[in-house]
Image (cartoon, grey):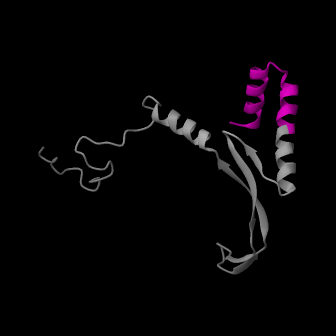
Amino acid sequence: MTKADLVEDVARAAELTKKDAERLVEIVFESIIETLNKGEKIELRGFGSFRVRERGARRGRNPKTGDPVNIPAKRVPYFKPGKELKELINEEAAGGGGSTPSTSSQSGEAPDAGNADDNRTPPIL
């Protein structure tokens, strides 16, 4: 989903013009960014929480040359999904109606077991 898709969904659900819905989405994003910049956390019950984590300075390596590189300390945004969101996502995945591939096989083996030798005889049950 893109920001434009989100604006369309908000406009449709709230019966707003696209321009008003876009401004509403912008206000929400700006509020989140402003709050995180202040060092405060945002907690949306049933959805999740946004926080800022501090990463210390460290030495890294340039992957192309292998030369050591100093990486400065920085602040990074972090999202932790809430319990209700996790449950809703897993509920959708469990009741998906076949949209995910089956993980069981007829022989009772793991799905990838035996892929190296496909010509072997199946086990006798």
Quarter in which the C terminus is drawn: top left
Q: Is residue 102 above or below residue 111?
A: above
Q: Residue 49 placed where, x, y %?
A: 71, 48
Name the residue located 85 percent from the left edge and 32 percent from the top edge. 24
Name the residue located 83 percent from the left edge and 25 percent from the top edge. 18
Name the residue located 74 percent from the left edge and 50 percent from the top edge. 50
Decide whether the magenta segment is chiefly helix, strand or loop: helix
> Which residue is more in the foreground, 35 or 104?
35
> Which residue is more in the foreground, 25 or 84?
84
Name the outermost residue toward the left. Answer: 124
Quarter in which the N terminus is drawn: top right
Does 13 lie within the magenta span? yes
Question: Which quadrant holds residue 21?
Answer: top right
Name the residue located 85 percent from the left edge and 50 percent from the top edge. 35
Q: Residue 106 placed where, x, y %?
A: 24, 40
Instruction: Please give left or right for residue 66 compared with residue 8 in the image.
Output: left
Question: Which quadrant holds residue 114?
Answer: bottom left
Name the outermost residue toward the bottom. Answer: 68
Chain part drawn in magenta = 1-27
> Which residue is more in the foreground, 125 or 122?
125
Name the outermost residue toward the front. Answer: 45
Instruction: Please give left or right for residue 115 compared with residue 70 in the image.
Output: left
Does 103 lie within the magenta span? no
> Which residue is more in the foreground, 55 or 8?
55
Q: Residue 29 placed where, x, y %?
A: 82, 42
Question: Which quadrant holds residue 82?
Answer: top right
